[in-house]
Image (cartoon, grey):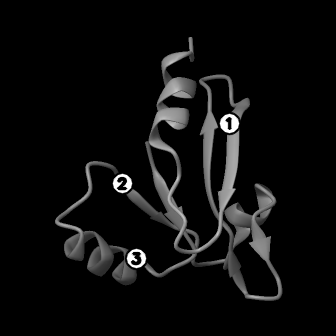
Amino acid sequence: MLGISCDHVNAHRAWSTAMGGLPYPELSDWHPKGQVTEAYGLWNDERGAGTRAIIVVDKEGVVRFRETYAPGTLPDPLAVLSVLENLD
């Protein structure tokens, strides 16, 4: 599991610390800004930021789950867990 955002690595560190630490790495899509986010079709030009999403990619690189979320909306962990449990 990885977390990716367009924030700078220092912002990731501060956020992770405020959360009490995270059990997975946070990757920065800072420069070139949003390149990975755009590759997954999640870049929002109007906001100049990425759209919040969970994407599950299998070992072969195939996207098996993709769901976007409005700010302040939390994903359904059971739906994501179900997808993960069904991966080969």
Give the spatial CA distance, label 3 vs label 2.
11 Å
Give residue 25's mark.
2
Q: Percent from the top left, x then y, of residue 40?
A: 76, 55
Mark in front: 1 vs 3: 1
Give the spatial CA distance, label 1 vs label 2.
20 Å
* Picture quadrant where residue 29 is located: bottom right
Mark 3–mark 2 contact, CB under 8 Å? no
Q: Is residue 84 left or right of residue 59?
A: left
Within-10-Å neighbours for mark 3: few <14, some 14–19, many 20+: some
Q: Earlier in the sequence, mark 1 or mark 3?
A: 3
* Picture quadrant where residue 62 is located: top right
Give the spatial CA distance, label 1 vs label 3.
26 Å
- Amino acid at the residue labelled 3: Val
Q: Residue at x 73, y 87 (%)?
A: 48
Q: Residue at x 57, y 78 (%)?
A: 30
Element on which disc 2 rests? loop
Give residue 9's mark.
3
- Amino acid at the residue labelled 1: Phe
